[in-house]
Amino acid sequence: MIEIRSCSGLDEMEACVQLQIETWGYDDSDVIPRKAFMVAQKIGGQVLGAFDSEIAEFPQKLAGFAMSLPGIKTRPGGMAEPYLHSHMLAVREVYRNRGLGAQLKREQRMEALSRGIRLMEWTFDPLEIKNAFLNIHKLGAVARTYLVNFYGVSSSRLQGGLPTDRLVAEWRLDSPRVEAILDGCGDDLREQKVEARIVVPAAIYGWKSSDGDRERARAVQWENRGRFQEAFSRGLAVIGFVRDEEGNGVFELGPMAQA
């Protein structure tokens, strides 16, 4: 039995820190400390935990967490809009591939909407097929911004020593697109006009983790970086993501008006 709720108390915040280290393998230069989790929650962000009620002790009781920070965007005309930047989402390995990540995102959405917040953003690695599938296909986020080496050098083993290039996911929490996808009506969006496709090979995970093949992953990153930048300069956005029969990830890009 998994319960998703706001984290409270030092033990639960510390469990989030430990799961962060377990997930990404960060060293001290990259770890977000417990006090930052506490401050994020205090100033209007979110620290939501997924707790396994059948386990009594910490940190194993924490199956996953999502942490966000509050922010303000200035829209055309000078209007200020509050939003949440979802900085971290982690799920313990034994709970993965069960939809828990999507459940945490849905809970983030509902909590944000309850406070009148209608936008959430986060960054994700465009070489990570599973993350892209969750963000674009299952949640309905779109992307139209590419950040080159955004975090600089990372100690995360998942980064494989590559530049920390990131796409920015934009999640309009109460948009017709998002509501349709979360309600299981995403097939209705398949008629969207796709003007460009960008492929991530299924083998990318092995290439990133192998000293002998890492340059192949770097070449994919370099080529795709240019293709994203060119497409975004033409006003296109990532509006879809699919996996083909070989397991390759395919970003689908089309006019932003469709999103």
Image (tube, grey):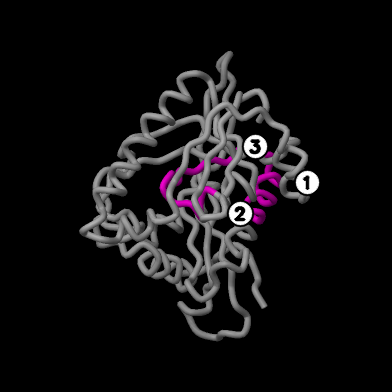
- Residue at which label 3 appears: 172
* Label 2 environment density (alpha carbons within 10 Å; few <14, some 14–19, many ≥20): some
146 or 205, nearer to the observer: 205
Name the element at disc 2: helix
Name the element at disc 3: strand
Position above or below: 10 against 150: below
156 or 133, nearer to the observer: 133
Return the disc, 1 or 3, that comes first in the chain's sequence: 3
The x and y percentages for residue 244 are: 56, 50
Q: CA distance from mark 1 to mark 3?
A: 17 Å
The x and y percentages for residue 111 are: 67, 51
Residue at the location (48% across, 52% down)?
129
Look at the image and tell me in which quarter the C terminus lies: top right
- Residue at which label 2 appears: 105
Position above or below: 69 against 191: below
Q: Is residue 119 left or right of residue 31?
A: right
50 or 197, nearer to the observer: 197
Amino acid type, residue under disc 3 in the picture: Arg
Residue at the location (27% across, 52% down)?
154
Nearest to viewer (mark 1 / mark 3): 1
- Residue at which label 1 appears: 185
The residue lying furthest to the left in this view is 212
**Magenta region:** 105-132
The residue lying furthest to the front in this view is 245
